[in-house]
Image (cartoon, helix red, strand yellow):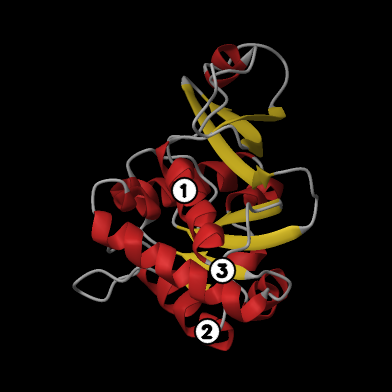
Amino acid sequence: MVRKYPERIAARMTRIINQDEVLLIRQNTKIKFGSSDAIIGTVFMTNPGSFDFKHTKGWADFKSGKGLLNVLETEDYADLTMQNLIEVIREGYKHANLGSPDGIVQIFNISNVVQSKGEEAEDYHKKVRVIIEKSDVQKLALIQDIVAVTEQEFLKACVSSRFVIMGFVNNVFTENVSNLIKWSRALEDRLVVAKDEKSRYSHPRRWRTEKNLKELAINEMCRALNKNY
């Protein structure tokens, strides 16, 4: 069977076992297009949601707290949000007459803590932070990348990208979102956002059901590629 979204998603999952609860932290997430290892784009979102390694042997045991390994780094197939990103990137290249994308799209989140309910991401992030502070303060660096909270590191991560996609869950991590939007003004020529009727940067998960936002994202992708290819 030919997959509609054959692109591989690479990531590193770290688990922290807190009594009967398994906390998952996702970092180093990348969408792999074609065969090139060159970074072609960057994405900023709220937090890791439903993507996991469900086709990977041992994943079920890992996320349930079984086994000795607390870090799992591998590849799997896209969930709905990743599929939406893949589709918009593909269509943007097509509209810009650039063929198919070939390279790495790096994914950063304001929080690295996995929480499938995006609206609860900030509260859950705070909860995990407290747990780590009590057990192993050295692991605090895992839950938030410096790229998402420091302007200089943010710009450094984006400077080589042909496009920078941004989209966030509404009313979550509002201060962080405000900072990212402010810093991104220096990248307007490559910035790809689909603003909704309230001028909010719509999260890519909305692009499946709200077709107007998806089309807007594709048009913005085409514009950014035409300026930076």
Q: Nearer the viewer, residue 173 or 75?
A: 75
Contact check, label 2 and label 1, Cβ < 8 Å: no
Residue plotted at (48% across, 51% down): 85
Residue under label 3, please give it.
Answer: 164
> Of residues 11 and 40, which is closer to you in this image?
40
The answer to whether 209 is drawn above or below residue 9 in the figure is below
Which secondary structure lies at badge 2? loop
User: Does the rendering let one see residue 202?
Assistant: no
Tag 1 secondary structure: helix
Mark sitting on residue 188: 2
Q: Residue furthest front?
A: 97
Q: Looking at this rendering, what residue extends furthest in the left direction? A: 197
Mark nearest the camera among 2 and 1 is 1
Horizontal placement of 34 versus 5: left or right? right
Kind of residue at badge 3: Val
Q: What amino acid does circle 1 point to?
A: Glu
Which residue is found at the position 43% from the left and 35% from the top? 50
Q: Which of the 4 image quarters holds residue 197? A: bottom left
